Amino acid sequence: MNHAHAHTAAHTPHGHDHASDGQAEILDLDAEVLAEHTASITAWLPLQTDPRHIVDLGCGTGAGTFALLDRFPDAHVTAVDASAEHLQRLRSKACSRGVQERVRTVQADLDEAAWPDLGSPDLVWASASMHHMAHPDRALRAVHEMLVPGGLFAVVELAGHPRFLPEDAPEDRPGLEERVHAEADRLQAEHMPHRGADWGPLLTTAGFRVEGERIMAVNTEGTHTAGTHTADTRPEGTHTAAIGRYALSVLQRIRTAVTDTLTPEDLAALDRLLDTSSSHSILRRDDLTVRTERTVWAARRT
């Protein structure tokens, strides 16, 4: 599978360990830059009681795991991922935060028909991981069976790649980022048919009752939501240096996928942005933001 999507590809529930090609760094930067956004999702979840056992499917290096541990101080988390390196990073973070006793890691390929015993959680969290599943219907049934009656399943998915540059940038090739993303999206559609899916009907078919759906537009200058719930409009902070590193890592990863399909002019412009020694380097820009959109489904096992 060609994991071209810079953010979601970093959550690898499959059997191949891709951590060596920069995913772990992207995950860590994503967690740093979008921490308040992730916290706002955990705060929105329509829980009847605070969970005590949480399973984080496709946990990566722990952005969701630690947001959930912060939100629910009496809970423990079983963090599941295919990548040994991701899980090792997560364990190291847990130790540095003093919460190692509240975290259990499990290395597993979630495309296998038989999953390891993950216990009986009252909350399952899957952020940017479900669209990687080769057999999502089977995975949804496995989650339904795993949850305790009344337990909640939170599915978080991205609408597309994060954007960083203004629309008229760079000056020599305006609109470059949109063209790069369009090529990456086209290539990835062949490999990830469930990316961008409406998970509501799929959850219902698997036996869940969907109790909430929320579209969250993310911008590092603020967060707003679409739907019936009150928006969380707290600013997420500037994080200028982290955003630059995040943009660099994401666009470096996308470049690998689109090298053969971009025009020579666009490829040259992209390389100027990615050249950290250049005056045109993306790290030298002071106009970067992180813009993306996430949809959250909250589904209950009845």
Image (cartoon, rainbow, N blue to C red):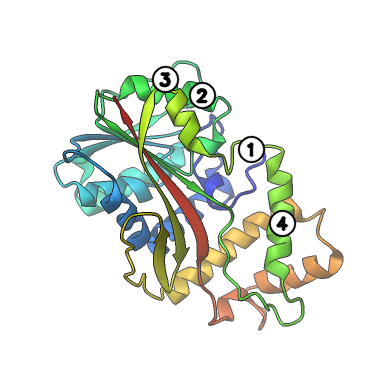
Q: Are marks 2 and 4 in contact (CB under 8 Å)?
A: no
The reply to whether residue 117 is visible in this rendering is no
The reply to whether residue 198 is visible in this rendering is yes
- Residue at 34 percent of width and 52 percent of height: 41
What distance separates the C-alpha of mark 2 from that of mark 1?
14 Å
Q: Does residue 59 sit above or below 139 in this rendering? A: below
Amino acid type shown at disc 3: Trp
Q: Left or right: 154 with respect to 97?
A: right
What distance separates the C-alpha of mark 2 from that of mark 3?
14 Å
Estimate how packed mark 1 is, as few (under 14), some (14 to 19) or many (20 or more) residues with alpha carbons within 10 Å. some
Amino acid type shown at disc 2: Asp
Along the viewing direction, whichever of 85 and 171 lies nearer the viewer: 171
Q: Does residue 203 sit above or below 174 in this rendering? A: above
The residue that disc 2 covers is: 137
Q: Residue 60, located in which quarter of the rendered image?
A: top left
What distance separates the C-alpha of mark 1 from that of mark 3?
21 Å
The percent coordinates of residue 122 (x first, y second) are 24, 31
What distance separates the C-alpha of mark 4 from that of mark 3?
35 Å
Comes first in the chain, label 2 or label 1? 2
What distance separates the C-alpha of mark 2 from that of mark 4?
28 Å
Disc number placed over residue 182 in the picture, else none: 4
Dot 4: element: helix
Comes first in the chain, label 4 or label 3? 3
Amino acid type shown at disc 1: Met
- Quadrant of the drawing holding the C terminus: top left
What distance separates the C-alpha of mark 4 from that of mark 1?
15 Å
Comes first in the chain, label 2 or label 4? 2
Along the viewing direction, whichever of 75 and 91 lies nearer the viewer: 75
Q: Does residue 39 sit above or below 267 in this rendering? A: above
Estimate how packed mark 4 is, as few (under 14), some (14 to 19) or many (20 or more) residues with alpha carbons within 10 Å. some
The residue that disc 1 covers is: 192
